[in-house]
Image (cartoon, rainbow, N blue to C red):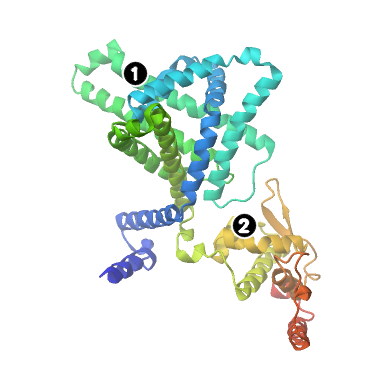
Amino acid sequence: MLSDLRQALDRLLWHTEPKYTSKVQAFLIQALRIFYGTFQDLKSGLPSLRAMSLVYTTLLSIVPLLAVSFSLLKGFGVHNQLEPALTNLLEPLGEKGVQISRQIITFVDNIKVGVLGSLGLLLLIFTVLSLVKKIESAFNATWEIAVTRNILQRFSNYLSVILVGPLLIFTSAGITASFNSSAVVNRFLMIEPFGSILLFMGELTPYILTTLCFTLIYLLIPNTKVHVRSALYGAVVTTILWYMFGSLFTAFIVNSTNYTAIYSSFAILIIFMLWIYISWLIILTGATISYYHQHPERISNKSRILRLSSRLREKLALTIMQLIGHSFHYHETPWSAQTLAKKINISEQALMIIMPALLSNELIVVTGEDQQHYLPAQSLENITLEMILNAVRSAEETPALQPDDIDSNRKISDAITELEQAISDSTKNKTLKDLI
């Protein structure tokens, strides 16, 4: 029974072409595939480990982050909304959230930016940037990106997140408070149908602004071009999970007396850390959903293979060199790791097993402002097939351990020599240009 169910799910996910189905069926199939890929990632435990590391970083950096945001947002006149917004953000913690927000605000008020001095201010900003850099590393790992931003790019992107993110959260809290206290709004609420419409808009606005905040995070944090549609897709799911798990957290954790009985006065800290962990896990799950929405071809099990046999390495290296050489010879757009992976139908992680070997043997070079595109490092006539094969066959070898360091009898050494000579003879006088 279970085997039949797995086969039926496999046929639905991987053997059904969405373009031959209705729009509704295609959307459902895509959603199921994204759910499958996200579930597999969560099952691996890596998102959970990244969320745990971000808990520690958040605890160290939350006060400096709010202090910097508080100083920047004074120019917008919304800095007075800091405590209501923080209380709203910690709403799933119930009364404990109010206590924690008041304590954090006290810490923020104690940070006098004007008297810190240049060194103190730089240390404050460094702490905040370290937090966002840690977040970027977690997002880049989700998007399978190995290249990091330069200093100028980091500063501009991080400043956008530090400024715009809290601004949207504060605006959400402010609008919610206005709907609950404004006399003009209360008068309109008494007039139908305006009352029902305003009530609905007042309840919907925080969700919209929260979704917009998550969308900007998914657009700006990863060091790659994220499509707005994919970021919005992940943000919508994240917003739903955020409020749903917030309600569950309040019902089952905060209102439970077990934590207070076990941890006593430390219960509030434990609950706070649990909520930070759940929050980061939800945000990273949304990042994974955005990633798979933009790259649905990487959901299948085939794209998850991270170990390559010798045959796969050799064929992959020749294919990569042929594509890079072809685009260079015919003056076409240079290939990046993303476009190569999509063309070859393999994951970027598997691709990056081969690329360092080709780079270290000076067969290809990186180019462009973002250093993410590849060109041949030599003339196509000078790059032989033997050079390409030797590059991947010797990849991961270190000076500490070479084939000649292995003690073996003479017959084995002779056999290996004959094999290498056979490869050399079969690729003799064949260059990369011959493959183009």
Q: Which residue, as the protein is rendered here, is positioned at the far top?
A: 183
The reply to whether residue 275 is visible in this rendering is yes
Q: Which residue does the image show at 65% across and 16% down from the upper left?
A: 116
Viewer-proximal residue among 218 and 121 = 121
Mark 1 secondary-structure assignment: helix
Give how far across and how far down residue 372 sits, in percent. Answer: 66, 51
The reply to whether residue 328 is visible in this rendering is no
In this picture, residue 297 sits left or right of residue 236: right
In this picture, residue 64 sits left or right of residue 422: left
Mark nearer the N terminus (1 vs 2): 1
Q: Amino acid at mark 2?
A: Ala
**Picture quadrant where residue 93 is located:** top left
Viewer-proximal residue among 172 and 19 = 172
Give how far across and how far down residue 230 sits, in percent. Answer: 45, 46
Q: Which residue does the image show at 76% across and 85% down from the upper left?
A: 409
For the C terminus, the quadrant is: bottom right
Residue ID for mark 2: 337
Viewer-proximal residue among 417 and 295 = 417
Give the Cα distance between marks 1 and 2.
48 Å
Give how far across and how far down residue 99 sits, in percent. Answer: 39, 21
Residue ID for mark 1: 177
Q: Amino acid at mark 1?
A: Ala
- Position above or below: 124 against 150: above
**Picture quadrant where residue 415 is located:** bottom right
For the N terminus, the quadrant is: bottom left
| Residue 356 - label | none
Give how far across and how far down residue 100 sits, in percent. Answer: 42, 23
Mark 2 secondary-structure assignment: helix
Neighbours of disc 2 within 10 Å: few (<14), some (14-19), many (20+) = some
Q: Which residue does the image show at 32% across and 70% down from the upper left?
A: 7
Which one is in front in this view, the residue at disc 1 or the one at disc 2?
A: 1
Q: Which residue does the image show at 32% across and 65% down from the upper left?
A: 9
